[in-house]
Image: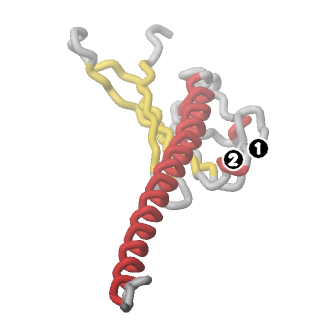
């Protein structure tokens, strides 16, 4: 009597194929989870970079102390530490690998693959129930990753009333 004690060649091939499909599906699932985690961490870093720069900009005076009306830095304001009002940041770009906080401390390595830029525009915003446009500045901070993904934060700052 001949007994069947093992797998046939076809059964072995089918079992191997099923196992391979299961491994590929599992690997794809793990990779998707890893990418989602990476994207979340990137977004958190980019948001922090944008918020900290915007907060610093908003801490500066609206009007230039020298009464200059030109957007962007005036002559002699050759760096962020010399900017003396909000619109001095117009056109500001901070390249990756040189990112520093407002105290001048270098950010940790996970922040260094980003680029920050600022646009400041004079605009008129219409606020509901007021009826007339309010003039002010729209400050837009953009953070771009080394892969080209962009995060943006924008704020409208109303011009102060009075002299």
Q: Residue at x 42, y 31 (%)?
A: 138
SS of the residue under disc 1? loop
Identify the disc placed on residue 123. none
User: Image height check: is 73 above or below 130?
Assistant: below
Q: What residue did someone put label 2 on?
A: 99
Q: What residue did someone put label 1 on?
A: 106
Residue 84 picture quarter? top right
Q: Residue at x 43, y 83 (%)?
A: 5
Q: Is residue 71 left or right of residue 76?
A: left
Could you say where residue 122 lies in the image, as x and y percent from the top left? 41, 32
Residue 4 picture quarter? bottom left
Mark 2 touching mark 1, by CB under 8 A?
Answer: yes
Could you say where residue 160 lies in the image, as x and y percent from the top left? 47, 14
Colouring used for the render: secondary structure
| Among numbered discs 2 and 1, the one appearing first in the sequence | 2
Could you say where residue 103 lies in the image, as x and y percent from the top left? 76, 32
Q: Residue at x 43, y 33 (%)?
A: 154
Q: Is residue 11 left or right of residue 153?
A: left
SS of the residue under disc 2? loop
Can residue 51 be seen in this snapshot?
yes
Q: Looking at the image, which is closer to me, 71 or 81? A: 81
């Amino acid at each position: 009597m001949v007994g069947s004690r093992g797998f046939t060649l076809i059964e072995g091939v089918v079992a191997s194929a099923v196992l391979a499909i299961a491994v590929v599906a599992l690997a794809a699932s793990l990779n998707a989870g890893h990418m989602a985690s990476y994207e979340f961490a990137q977004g958190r870093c980019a948001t922090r970079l944008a918020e900290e720069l915007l907060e610093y900009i908003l801490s500066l005076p609206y009007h230039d102390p020298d009464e200059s009306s030109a957007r962007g830095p005036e002559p002699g304001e050759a760096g962020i530490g010399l900017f003396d009002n909000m619109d001095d940041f117009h056109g500001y770009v901070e390249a990756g690998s040189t990112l520093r906080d407002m105290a001048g401390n270098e950010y940790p390595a996970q922040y260094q693959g980003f680029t920050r830029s600022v646009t400041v525009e004079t605009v008129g915003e219409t606020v509901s129930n007021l009826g007339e446009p309010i003039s002010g500045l729209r400050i837009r901070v953009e953070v771009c990753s080394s892969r080209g993904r962009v995060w943006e934060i924008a704020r409208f700052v109303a011009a102060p009333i009075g002299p």
